[in-house]
């Protein structure tokens, strides 16, 4: 067990959805949380990251910083998604090694797995087939990050681990209509359709793809659990263990928002991977399970959306 008591823990990416949730969870522990705003520490600047890490000397690091976005963002900015994520993760991981950080947790993504991986997806499915083209640039960067952690473990014997969350949602998400992921995009669409008095709400594709979703506070709880209780070479899936179709999800969101119109489908748009459900057997065997169900999570997320609509992340 890695005892968090009186430890200094650096959360890289603390203003993002996942990073801020990790900070909230760590506030329940007797530890010192280190953070750095972008204007104080540019994670793309190798020299600055090295200097900051050597000065602060954290005991543990959580690498939650990343450039993220949905299908449109990945298709529009492939070079940015690959380059920036590679640079961020290599800078933070390498600087952690130089600063003799005792424990590091790299935050990946379920998109690392092949498009047609057997379901539910087990950890050993990695690199067994082609990736989903709509997010391959982000996926390649995340695969490189987890492999870099494995390489440091193998060469230097350091305790660097990786957690692979499924699709996350919750407070702190990006609700931009074009650049966001599916739940915030659906919530924004339903909200605006309701207030415009629209008869219907349109979504991309056929609505048939199956997806798994995990509330970000459950994810943060799992990551802190792994930080404390896991020290293995292989990455660990972090998911809810259940999935539903995008059409079913859209209707759940519409009910939460209170939009009573119809659901329309733009079948000229891509569906993406047909199904993506990760196996949670490994983390369950370690002793962790999620506790926030999707309906309750969607309601609390919409409440947060209503309370934070004035933020820049909502602007189109």
Image (cartoon, grey):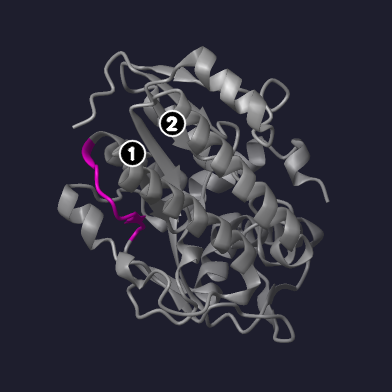
- Would residue 75 appear left or right of 150 to someone viewing this image? right
Q: Is 129 drawn above or below residue 228 in the view shown?
A: below
What residue is pinned by disc 2? Answer: 97
Q: Check if mark 1's residue and mark 2's residue have beta carbons within 8 Å.
A: yes
Q: Residues within 10 Å of mark 2 (few under 14, many from 20)?
A: some
Q: Mark 1: which secondary structure?
A: helix
Please, which residue is most extreme toward the right here?
316
Q: Is 184 drawn above or below residue 227 in the view shown?
A: below
Residue 241 shows up from this direction = yes
* Residue for point 58% across, 47% down: 302
The stretch in magenta equals 229-240
Corner quadrant of residue 212: bottom left
Counting from the top left corner in percent of width and height, residue 211 is at 47, 70
Q: Nearer the viewer, residue 100 or 59?
A: 100
Mark 1 or mark 2, whichever is nearer to me: 1
What residue is pinned by disc 1? Answer: 156
- The CA span between labels 1 and 2 is 9 Å
Counting from the top left corner in percent of width and height, residue 276 is at 44, 72
- Would residue 73 appear left or right of 137 to someone viewing this image? right
Counting from the top left corner in percent of width and height, residue 150 is at 37, 50
Corner quadrant of residue 180: bottom right
* Residue for point 38% across, 43% down: 152
Q: Mark 2: which secondary structure?
A: helix
Q: Nearer the viewer, residue 83 or 250?
A: 83
Corner quadrant of residue 58: top left
């Amino acid at each position: 067990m890695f005892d968090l008591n009186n430890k200094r823990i650096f959360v890289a990416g603390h203003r993002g959805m996942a990073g801020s949730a990790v900070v909230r969870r760590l506030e329940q522990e007797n530890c010192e949380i280190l953070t750095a705003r972008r204007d104080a520490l540019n994670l793309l600047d190798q020299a600055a990251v090295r200097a900051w890490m050597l000065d602060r000397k954290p005991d543990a690091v959580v690498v939650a910083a990343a450039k993220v976005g949905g299908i449109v963002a990945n298709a529009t900015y492939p070079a940015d998604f690959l380059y920036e994520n590679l640079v961020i993760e290599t800078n933070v991981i390498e600087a952690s090694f130089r600063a003799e950080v005792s424990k590091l947790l790299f935050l990946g993504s379920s998109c690392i797995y092949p498009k047609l991986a057997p379901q539910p997806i087990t950890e050993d499915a990695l690199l067994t087939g082609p990736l989903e083209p709509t997010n391959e640039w982000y996926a390649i960067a995340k695969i490189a990050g987890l492999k870099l952690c494995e390489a440091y473990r193998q060469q230097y014997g350091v305790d660097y681990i990786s957690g692979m969350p499924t699709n996350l949602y919750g407070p702190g998400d990006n609700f931009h209509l074009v650049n966001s992921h599916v739940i915030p995009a659906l919530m924004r669409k339903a909200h605006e359709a309701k207030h415009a008095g629209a008869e219907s709400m349109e979504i991309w594709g056929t609505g048939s793809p199956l997806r798994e979703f995990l509330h970000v506070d459950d994810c943060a709880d799992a990551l802190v659990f792994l930080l404390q209780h896991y020290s293995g070479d292989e990455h660990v899936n972090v998911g809810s263990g259940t999935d539903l179709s995008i059409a079913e999800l859209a209707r759940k969101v519409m009910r939460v928002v209170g939009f009573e119109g119809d659901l329309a489908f733009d079948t000229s748009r891509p569906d993406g991977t047909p199904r993506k459900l990760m196996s949670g057997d490994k983390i369950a065997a370690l002793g962790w399970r999620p506790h926030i169900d999707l309906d309750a999570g969607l309601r609390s997320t919409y409440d947060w959306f209503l309370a934070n609509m004035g933020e820049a992340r909502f602007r189109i």
